[in-house]
Image (spheres, rainbow, N blue to C red):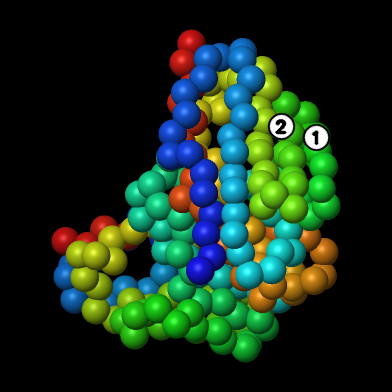
Amino acid sequence: GQNIDQPTEMTATEGAIVQINCTYQTSGFNGLFWYQQHAGEAPTFLSYNVLDGLEEKGRFSSFLSRSKGYSYLLLKELQMKDSASYLCAVLDSNYQLIWGAGTKLIIKP
Amino acid sequence: DAMVIQNPRYQVTQFGKPVTLSCSQTLNHNVMYWYQQKSSQAPKLLFHYYDKDFNNEADTPDNFQSRRPNTSFCFLDIRSPGLGDAAMYLCATSRPAGAGTDTQYFGPGTRLTVL
């Protein structure tokens, strides 16, 4: 079966750095997405990785290792507004998006 | 601004009373999706359309139906809502598979309450 694993919940301090990990086992791979979802709202697109390495976009960076089936989302200079769930999703060989359950990130002052 | 719009944002219905949720898009994307998401769970794909080509997920209950009368609009019909159908319903759009990043863009969602 297809599986995406990410921690259920993480806590970090305002101004700090946090890394959210995602491991996946899917039938084929056509890219990995990270979405941010605030409570009661729709997911919003953060990043897309299809090649190995680090993609940096402002305070957010996303890393991919296809050989290890592993990605992480790195958030720097955390702000209170970054409190949200972060969902990892993989596009499989049929171009179906397989979703993780999300990591709830709690930011404390 | 190009976007995905869902109406209504909040829908309350009674057990067994049919309800229709709507989605429209100005992104001119070929592919449209309907997801169901319950609290602290991953979005669950119900259907997707590639243009008018309808694709039903194997485990989507028969209680759920969908229509896409044109490129811009898509509807989700719940014929006889049960208490277990209370959830956030998300509409998303994307370009065709392989045509770029295939990023899915989401509407704001419709939160369905079943009394």
* Label 2: which secondary element: strand
Q: Considering depth in this image, is B65 or B46 the residue closer to the camera?
A: B46
Q: Is residue A38 visible?
A: no
Chain of the residue where label 1 is placed in the rendered structure:
A
Which image quarter: residue B84? bottom left
Left or right position of A53 against A47? right
Tell me the kind of residue under disc 2.
Phe
Residue at 55 percent of width and 47 percent of height: A87
- Mark 2 and mark 1 residues within 8 Å of each other at the beta carbon: yes
- Determine the residue positioned at 82% across, 70% down: B99
Residue A7 position in % (x across, y down): 48, 39
Which quarter of the figure has residue A98? Answer: bottom right
Residue B65 placed where, x, y %?
A: 41, 83
State the mark number for residue A56.
1
- Which residue is found at the position 17% from the left and 70% from the top? B15
The residue furthest bottom is: B53
Q: Residues within 10 Å of mark 2 (few under 14, many from 20)?
A: some
| Same chain, labels 2 and 1 | yes
In the displayed structure image, the side of residue B84 where residue B104 appears, left or right: right
Q: Quadrant of residue B33?
A: bottom right
**Residue that badge 2 annotates:** A60
The picture places residue B5, in percent across and down from the top left corner, at 56, 60
Residue at image x 77%, y 29%?
A58
Residue B113 to residue A60: above or below: below
The tag on residue B79 is none
- What kind of residue is marked 1? Glu
Query: Chain ID for label 2?
Result: A
Q: Nearer the viewer, residue B63 or A66?
A: A66
On screen, residue B9 above or below A40: below
Q: CA distance from mark 2 to mark 1?
A: 6 Å
